[in-house]
Image (spheres, helix red, strand yellow):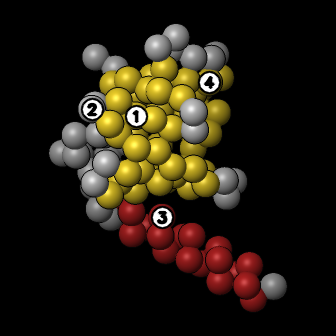
Amino acid sequence: MEDRLAQKGLAQMNSQNTAARPLASHPYVGMWVTADGHIRHNLLPNGRYDEARGSRDSAYQGRYEIRGNHIDYWDDTGFTADGTFIDGVLHHAGMILYREK
């Protein structure tokens, strides 16, 4: 029980810390989409993301952190993932996402 409370507190603290560090000027903030437009990652300037899949808006939401060209995701259900930005393209979970223009 204590472990779950500690993890919940840490998650809230991390979420608050991320939100306190705006990323508005970071070059990777914004919308990233697969070539067919099916998957859409909106990297928000407050360190949160909103992922849409097909006609399902906000299919996944959570926080993210970018270090160099690496991105880590923590969705609100506890799932984690990561990706790498290579030559202006996001490689994530076997998908390739392009910056929406």
In the rendered structure, which disc, 3 or 2, sits on the residue that comes first in sequence?
Answer: 3
Q: Residues within 10 Å of mark 3 (few under 14, many from 20)?
A: some
Mark nearest the camera among 3 and 2 is 2
Q: Is residue 1 visible?
A: yes
Residue in view at x 39 percent, y 69 percent: 17
Residue 19 % position (x, y) = 38, 60
> How many angstroms separate mark 3 from mark 1 (CA)?
23 Å
User: Which residue sits furthest top?
Assistant: 36
- The residue singled out by tag 2 in the image is 87
Mark nearest the camera among 1 and 4 is 1
Determine which quarter of the picture holds residue 59. top right
Q: Residues within 10 Å of mark 2 (few under 14, many from 20)?
A: few
- The residue singled out by tag 1 in the image is 90
In the rendered structure, which disc, 4 or 2, sits on the residue that comes first in sequence?
Answer: 4
Reply above or below: 87 against 70: above
Q: Which mark is residue 15?
A: 3
- The residue singled out by tag 4 in the image is 53
> How many angstroms separate mark 3 from mark 2 (CA)?
29 Å
Contact between marks 3 and 2 (CB within 8 A): the answer is no
* Viewer-nearest residue: 50 or 69: 69
Reply above or below: 12 against 75: below
> How many angstroms separate mark 4 from mark 2 (CA)?
24 Å
Report the amino acid beneath label 1. Leu
Mark 1 lies on a secondary structure that is strand
In the rendered structure, which disc, 4 or 3, sits on the residue that comes first in sequence?
Answer: 3
Q: Residues within 10 Å of mark 1 (few under 14, many from 20)?
A: many
